Amino acid sequence: MKNAALIERLISLARLDYDVMCAYEEAIRRIDKNDRDVREHLIQYRNAHAIHVNALSTAIVDLGGSVPALSPEARGNTSQGVVSLTNASGTTAALQALRQNEIFIEKAYDSARSDPEFSDYPFDLQEHFKNFLVDEEQHLSYIDSALKFLAAAVR
Ligand SMILES: [Fe+2]
């Protein structure tokens, strides 16, 4: 993969990861106040996504690219698969929206990881992708278990 194509891929992933981070921000504001354990996890995962965005931004610059303007106003243009939490009210609805986003971003990193030219990526970047995938699997796993717990508690 030439640098230009890789930079494009990284820009797209940085936007996606940023949008997912924003969805966590929204979720943290919308979950029920009493769900403190869920809130702590969501803050931790929001921070993980911020770390991803920073690492991707550094990689883009290292490859000679320009980091895209990332702001809440710029959302929705590029990350078509990211679910907004505008209509989510309460912990279950917020977690369900986050779950969709985690499935989406996990696929994006899995696809990058499956690139036939992955072994030609800079070493740091290969490590980042492996670590990010582990993060996404962990986020999704927690969200699934929290949703199951909430569903059982309602019965
Ligand atoms: Fe995640």
Image (cartoon, helix red, strand yellow):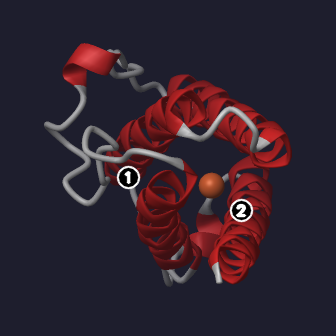
- Which residue is outermost to the front? 155
* Residue located at (64% from left, 40% from top): 49
In the rendered image, which residue does mark 2 sit on?
Answer: 139
Percent across and percent down for residue 55 are: 68, 33
Percent across and percent down for residue 140 are: 66, 70
Q: Does residue 136 lie above or below 27 as drawn?
A: below
- Kindly indicate the quadrant of the structure image that contains residue 113: bottom right
In the rendered image, which residue does mark 1 sit on?
Answer: 9
Say whether marks 1 and 2 touch (CB < 8 Å). no
Q: Viewed as shown, does residue 15 lie left or right of 87?
A: right
- Quadrant where ligand 1 appears: bottom right
- Nearer-the-camera pick, 105 or 13: 105
**Of pointers 1 and 2, the one earlier in the residue sequence:** 1
- Nearer-the-camera pick, 151 or 84: 151
* Residue located at (31% from left, 53% from top): 82
Q: Identify the amino acid type marked 1.
A: Arg
- How many callouts does the rendering have? 2
From the Cβ of disc 2, is ligand 1 less than 8 Å away? yes
Q: Viewed as shown, does residue 32 lie left or right of 51?
A: left
- Kindly indicate the quadrant of the structure image that contains residue 139: bottom right
C-alpha gap between disc 1 and disc 2? 22 Å
Q: Does residue 124 lie above or below 154 as drawn?
A: above
Q: Where, quadrant-wise, is the C terminus in this rendering?
A: bottom right
Q: What secondary structure is found at the residue carrying circle 1?
A: helix
Q: Identify the amino acid type marked 2.
A: His
* Residue located at (67% from left, 64% from top): 136
